[in-house]
Image (cartoon, grey):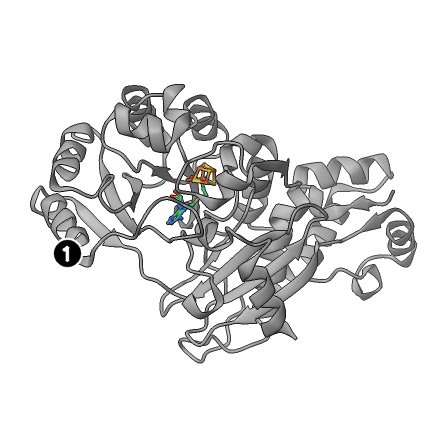
Amino acid sequence: MPQNLLDFDLEGLTAWFGELGEKPFRARQVFHWVHQAGVADFVQMTDIAKSLREKLQQRAVVAVPAINYAHTSADGTRKWLFDVGVANGIETVFIPEEDRGTLCVSSQVGCALECTFCSTGRQGFNRNLTVAEIIGQLWVAQHSLKTEPNRTTGEMAERPVSNVVMMGMGEPLANFENVVTALGVMLDDHAYGLSRRRVTVSTSGLVPAMDRLAERCPVALAVSLHAPNDALRDRIVPINRKYPLRELMAACRRYLVHAPRDFITFEYVMLAGVNDQPEHARQLIELTRDVPCKFNLIPFNPFPDSGYEKPRMESMRVFREILQDAGYVVTTRKTRGDDIDAACGQLAGKVADRSGRVMKRMHKEAA
Ligand code: SAH
Ligand code: SF4
């Protein structure tokens, strides 16, 4: 089996080059070609000695998962569906805005954590993505988007992806080593050079892994809270039974000591009649009193047989105002890319019945 160079960070590539008897600066050159120039074919790496190019051709590849589907919605949101050989693949979504381009990246096929409102959780766990499959999502997005004008600003960008959010399919901290290696490549100036503040890991609250992330690769952190007390969170985010709210809040405070930003983003999916009442907002204020944070309220994105409903606009407004009056910064997630089922953060919900209705429609659209 040839070695996929997308599985390496620069340190790994340098070590592998060492085994081939090649110098570290050669590894750096190839790393630039792969990640900055987006070149997968060794023949095109013109400043690399022919003998090394031939060696690489025999032993290595730069391979991303096959793209099953790519589509751009009317508002410029772009979605790719990748074939990862199992289930129905994974999704990556790009959301262009005036001052940034955000890529929503998947970390696993399925998810073992079984949050009850999440369609990924409902479909169960399939497998972890490899480093190449994680970084490959950014590789494809960056290098295909830089050849087209930004749909929002009309400008061409050398690096269209300025932000990454690990909010696609899967729990990133449950695929820790591969995610940390991929994050390293995203941040590396020899590759994508993204700012730590612009790379966000979203977690349902795996407390020990949050501490390890702070140590190994502190990036911006979003925590999927979704409930203001243990009784309710035990029901909708079952990992809470293992790491209850008191421990989670303490882990957030510890994370902030190392974090590149001075706040945690709490994501809160609004489920009608379940967690969207004024008393829940008031409990949240109490719960997060000692944690510098912002709130991101996400209207539940329905999927068949979910058992939940979208919140009423009015309950979202009241909820938001209670938090804002207490001094919190609150964002309500915009819905983008609706026409291609790609609203980021609602992605997990959107890809829900990938096996059924949505997939069939995608295929129809793609045809
Ligand atoms: N596993 C990680 C990251 C992936 S989920 C996590 O849970 O944080 C990304 C975000 O989408 C999470 O906040 C998740 O709770 C939210 N989400 C999942 N299903 C949803 C749905 N049906 N509607 C709206 N948001 C949803
Ligand atoms: Fe997994 Fe996140 Fe979905 Fe929970 S919300 S099941 S952690 S992907």
Which image quarter: residue 8?
top right
Residue under the image location 72 percent in, 53 percent down: 29
Residue under the image location 56 percent in, 54 percent down: 354
- Provide residue 254's location: percent of width, then percent of height: 33, 24
Which image quarter: residue 82?
bottom right
Of 235 and 179, which appears nearest the observer?
A: 235
Count of numbered badges drawn on the protein: 1
Of 2 and 218, which appears nearest the observer?
A: 2
Which image quarter: residue 70?
bottom right
User: Left or right: 256 with respect to 20?
Assistant: left
Q: Is residue 111 above or below residue 158?
A: above
Q: Is residue 361 above or below residue 186?
A: below
Q: Which residue is mark 1?
A: 314
Residue under the image location 68 percent in, 46 percent down: 132
Residue under the image location 58 percent in, 73 percent down: 365
Dot 1, crowdedness within 10 Å: few (<14), some or many (≥20)? few
- Provide residue 15's location: percent of width, then percent of height: 75, 35
Assign the N terminus to one quadrant of the image. Answer: top right
Quadrant where ligand 1 appears: top left
